[in-house]
């Protein structure tokens, strides 16, 4: 028996225990069994929003520490705190390979995109600091 959230609260990380796991059916969990292929620590994590966890494309990305990113489906400052979640970075990379450019960001740098267009580099302002989460 598996207890699942209702449709309005389901996110990409909710496994279907009724089927045998494999990377094609549940890629978000692939790095539990498969080797970590990325150049960042496997403990890397990201603050993201419920829209991204429900499948909306990430449109803003910023790297704040060696192993910490913020990835939002929309404008990060507009995301209410109650809709933010901390997840393993590998989960998001496994579901959306188009996020690969975030791995090349230097600490303090960010990128953005809209409507399936290529990633654009944020212009860093002098003295810019990490915003409060």
Image (cartoon, rainbow, N blue to C red):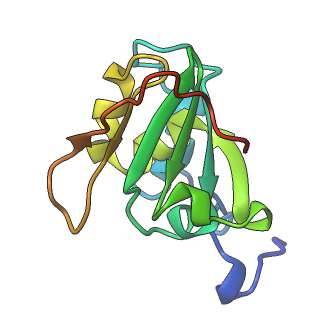
In the rendered view, tell whether residue 108 sits above or below residue 74: above
**Front residue of this view, candidates 25 and 110:** 110
**Front residue of this view, candidates 32 and 123:** 123
Query: In the picture, residue 32 is in which quadrant?
Result: top right
Query: In the picture, residue 89 is in which quadrant?
Result: top right
In the rendered view, tell whether residue 29 sits above or below residue 50: above
- Residue pictured at 32% horizontal, 20% vertical: 104
In the rendered view, tell whether residue 23 sits above or below residue 16: above
Furthest toward the left, the residue is 117
Q: Position of residue 122 (x, y in %)?
A: 31, 38
- Residue pictured at 72% horizontal, 53% vertical: 85
**Front residue of this view, candidates 89 and 48:** 48
Instruction: Name the quarter where the N terminus is drawn.
Output: bottom right
Furthest toward the front, the residue is 126
**Horizontal relation, residue 37 to residue 22: left or right:** left
Query: In the picture, residue 76 is in which quadrant?
Result: bottom right
Q: Position of residue 75 (x, y in %)?
A: 48, 61
**Horizontal relation, residue 16 to residue 4: left or right:** left
- Residue pictured at 47% horizontal, 36% vertical: 62
- Residue pictured at 60% horizontal, 24% vertical: 44
Instruction: Name the quarter where the C terminus is drawn.
Output: top right
């Amino acid at each position: 028996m598996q207890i699942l959230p209702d449709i309005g609260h389901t996110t990409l990380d909710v496994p279907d225990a009724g089927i045998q796991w494999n990377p094609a059916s549940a890629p978000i969990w692939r790095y539990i069994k498969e080797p970590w292929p990325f150049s960042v620590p496997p403990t890397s994590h990201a603050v993201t929003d419920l829209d991204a966890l429900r499948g909306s494309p990430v449109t803003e990305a910023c790297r704040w520490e060696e192993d910490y990113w913020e990835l939002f489906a929309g404008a990060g400052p507009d995301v209410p705190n109650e809709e933010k979640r901390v997840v393993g970075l590998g989960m998001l990379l496994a579901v959306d390979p188009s996020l690969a450019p975030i791995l090349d960001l230097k600490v303090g740098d960010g990128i953005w995109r809209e409507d399936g267009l290529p990633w654009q580099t944020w212009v860093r302002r002098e003295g810019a600091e990490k915003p409060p989460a």
